[in-house]
């Protein structure tokens, strides 16, 4: 997959510039909450913020890239920068206790001590509570950057002790323009218009994930699922890729069905309010099944797809 840099993600220009200006003015908060998903560049922004904070010759556009601190940071060997990721499915209390201990030690390079906590929604209660004291009394020259894909899962006590990084998501047209800039949009078939690839943007989790999907043919599989759901619902029987959908593919297939159902409600003018409500209920049922499938040992994927087709047809009175 093509690697992207901060200067290639225009929707992150404003939050990064604001952070740099705060650093230059000496009014930067000691804890920053980056509520930006990985698919929109949350990890990239958090890393660039950390590098800028540690740079000894900070410029109006970010880190200088030439000082000793920048060179160590780029090499991944800066002794005063600490990156925390989940150990398995959780960020554990021992990881945070170890981090807090390291942040109390005098900076080896004599500047900032910085912690980047990726996907901080993966805190458990013990690890979140272990960080609170450091957030309340961080000491001098400490910066803690918490990135999260799901800010609603963070404790209110964590969020209230951080400065929220203000951010505006790009709209679909801006995402399309961005994909086109890097020549990632699939070419139109002869005699047809280029279709809107952003239909699955929410499912992907952002432009970067969508770009990856377009590059590795995963997107083509999702598009095939969408076309086959439409055919299957029309006929009442499984069609195409859904006939042999595997356990490894079922979550993707059901996520596409969820989007199909939501779009059906938005675009159809022929269904009554009760049917509309029932279809929305069915889409919620599909979303819940996607979550359950992550813990289920096995599933008859085609049979599950057929059940949803029949249920949908009943809701719109197709026999």
Image (tube, rainbow, N blue to C red):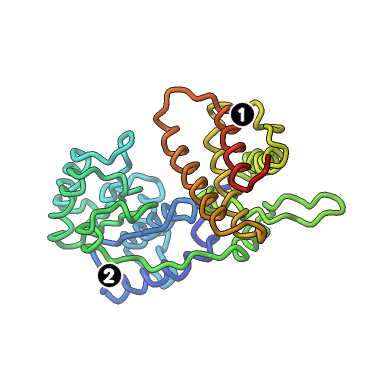
- List x then y, in percent, for residue 273: 55, 59
Within 10 angstroms of label 1, few (less than 14), some, or many (20 or more) residues? some
- List x then y, in percent, for residue 136: 14, 60
State left or right for residue 61 relative to residue 100.
right
Q: Which mark is residue 28?
A: 2
Residue toward you, 255 or 207: 255
The quarter in which the N terminus is drawn is: top right
- List x then y, in percent, for residue 247: 53, 27
Tag 1 secondary structure: loop
- Is residue 75 visible in the rendered image? The answer is yes
Q: Which mark is residue 213?
A: none
Residue toward you, 176 or 49: 176
- List x then y, in percent, for residue 12: 47, 64
The single residue placed furthest to the bottom in the displayed view is 25
The single residue placed furthest to the right in the displayed view is 191
Q: Is residue 288 above or below residue 57?
A: above
Please give the residue where the numbered disc 1 appears in the rendered image.
245
- Is residue 181 visible in the rendered image? The answer is no
Within 10 angstroms of label 2, few (less than 14), some, or many (20 or more) residues? some
Residue drawn at (40%, 46%) of the image: 75
Camera-nearest label, 2 or 1: 1
Q: CA distance from mark 2 to mark 1?
A: 51 Å
The quarter in which the C terminus is drawn is: top right
* Mark 2 or mark 1, earlier in chain: 2
Residue drawn at (56%, 65%) of the image: 171
- Give the total of numbered labels: 2
Q: Is residue 207 above or below residue 286?
A: below
Tag 2 secondary structure: loop
């Amino acid at each position: 997959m093509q690697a992207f840099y901060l200067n290639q993600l225009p929707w992150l220009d404003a939050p990064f510039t604001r952070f740099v200006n705060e650093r230059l003015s000496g009014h930067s908060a000691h804890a920053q909450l980056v509520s930006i998903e990985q698919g929109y560049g949350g990890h990239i922004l958090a890393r660039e913020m950390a590098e800028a904070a540690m740079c000894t010759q900070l410029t109006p556009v970010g880190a200088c890239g030439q000082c000793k601190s920048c060179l160590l940071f780029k090499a991944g060997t800066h002794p005063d920068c600490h990156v925390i990721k989940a150990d398995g499915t959780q960020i554990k209390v021992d990881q945070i206790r170890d981090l807090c201990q390291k942040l109390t030690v005098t900076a080896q390079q004599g500047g900032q001590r910085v912690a980047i906590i990726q996907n901080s929604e993966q805190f458990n209660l013990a690890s979140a509570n272990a960080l609170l004291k450091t957030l309340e009394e961080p000491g001098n020259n400490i910066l803690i950057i918490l990135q999260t894909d799901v800010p609603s899962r963070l404790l209110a006590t964590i969020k209230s002790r951080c400065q929220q990084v203000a951010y505006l998501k790009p709209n679909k047209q801006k995402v399309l323009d961005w994909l086109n800039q890097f020549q990632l949009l699939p070419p139109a078939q002869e005699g047809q218009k280029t279709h809107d690839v952003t239909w699955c943007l929410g499912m992907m989790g952002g432009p970067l994930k969508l770009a990856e999907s377009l590059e590795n043919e995963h997107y083509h599989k999702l598009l095939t699922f969408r076309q086959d759901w439409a055919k299957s619902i029309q006929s009442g029987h499984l069609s195409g890729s859904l006939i042999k959908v595997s356990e490894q593919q079922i979550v993707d297939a059901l996520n596409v069905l969820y989007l199909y159902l939501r779009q059906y409600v938005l675009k159809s003018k022929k269904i009554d309010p009760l049917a509309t409500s029932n279809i929305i209920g069915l889409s919620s049922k599909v979303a819940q099944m996607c979550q359950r499938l992550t813990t289920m040992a096995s599933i008859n994927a085609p049979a599950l797809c057929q059940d949803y087709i029949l249920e949908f047809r009943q809701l719109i009175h197709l026999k």
